[in-house]
Image (cartoon, rainbow, N blue to C red):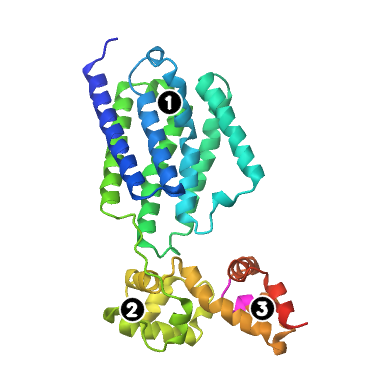
Amino acid sequence: MYLSFADIFDLFLRFLAVGQLSLLCHYILSKNQNLSSALAVSVNICLCAYLLLTAPIPDHYYGVLRGILLFFTEVAPYLLWLLVLLHFKDNFQPTKWSIWIKVSIGLMLLWFIYFFGYIKGSGSFHQVNHLIQLFFIIHIIYVAVQEFPDDLVQARRNARLVTIIYTCIYLILILILELGNAVIRDSSIFSIVNAGLVLVSTSFFSWHYFNNRFTEKTKTASVEEIKDNDNYPPSIPLVFKNVYQQLNQLMQDGFYTETQLSIKQLANKLKMPEHQLRELINKHLGFRNFSDFLSSYRIPAACAQFEDITFIRKPILTIALELGYGSIATFNRTFKAQKGITPKEYRNKFQK
């Protein structure tokens, strides 16, 4: 087998990236051994498989290894999707999925092992799978963008940006090229650029990961402590003393009932930088999302009206809109998440 200088340089970049990813896997597992770590390591392994599979080496040299590498390459977007939802969605709990969903996933894995691992992707399902992957990647971008303004956790906001800018855009370009012209995809220039982009991306991610840019450092305080204490609680630093008292007074005055209230609007009202307000609410009051912070005032206010017989004729929709919710669906979902029952069921408990 003859390898040109371009091929050797290409392999050098790929092996550097594989080495980085291997060290990152070891570091992740040494810190935590949970579902999140397992998914992160799995995604890294899949990326290693992709780098080795697309190396400038003829397919027949791989032998049975090609099917194994192809399998891990093809499941990568789905594992990334699970990892993103696990990190960005606080209520996402795949361990609590029904047995039917788990069985379906198991059957799909068996099919992937057979199609990609055994027959090495020989069939039309290979292209169909690329289209399915594209939809999953688009959903990843949607999840990362959707709650970005509402997210208070700086480490998670950093991860959202990395997901949007690097991972998803890169994967979409790869999928488009996979579905497009094979001449471009198989060229030496594209292969080197591809390997170089992966190496730069893994280096960037590893540097930020080792510097704890994606590590949450949230200090939790109870909602009762926030509401009932007229003075600032012990977890509030002196630098935030005045602004916390202003925030507390503003919420007690009912500012949380403003419709479509955003953290930017609240920061403008308090005349302080948005990032400082985000730090106060997240690190020192313990809220991960701005909507959760608002709901800590809105839901108790709704409960007070449900428990009061004088509001028995007042529609639930009216109460929800007056408290600042944009729709009854959002109110119902938030209320049930906090109380375990629907607003109607809660009201019926007190007004029978």
Q: Which residues are magenta?
A: 320-325
Query: Most extreme residue toward the right, as rendered?
Result: 352
Q: Position of residue 240 (x, y in %)?
A: 31, 79
Quadrant into which the N terminus falls = top left
Instruction: Name the residue at 33% across, 46% down.
Output: 30
Give the mark, 2 or 1, whose residue is nearer the N terminus: 1
Residue that label 1 marks: 69
Instruction: Name the residue at 51% across, 38% down.
Output: 134
Camera-nearest residue between 191 and 203 = 203
Q: Secondary structure at mark 1?
A: helix
Q: What is the crowding at mark 1: few (fewer than 14 residues within 10 Å), some, or many (at least 20)?
A: many
Residue that label 2 marks: 236
Label drawn at residue 91: none
Camera-nearest residue between 169 and 67 = 67
Q: Position of residue 236 (x, y in %)?
A: 33, 78
Q: What is the crowding at mark 2: few (fewer than 14 residues within 10 Å), some, or many (at least 20)?
A: some
Instruction: Name the residue at 53% across, 54% down.
Output: 92
Q: Secondary structure at mark 2?
A: loop
Give the mark, 3 or 2, whose residue is nearer the N terminus: 2
Query: Most extreme residue toward the left, as rendered?
Result: 5
Q: Secondary structure at mark 3?
A: helix
Callout 3, which amino acid? Answer: Thr
Query: Most extreme residue toward the top, as rendered?
Result: 1
Compared with residue 126, is residue 30 higher up or lower down, i.e. above or below? below
Q: Is residue 323 magenta?
A: yes
| Label 1 to label 3: alpha-carbon separation | 57 Å
Compared with residue 217, is residue 192 higher up or lower down, i.e. above or below? above
Instruction: Name the residue at 56% across, 23% down.
Output: 114
Callout 1, which amino acid? Answer: Leu
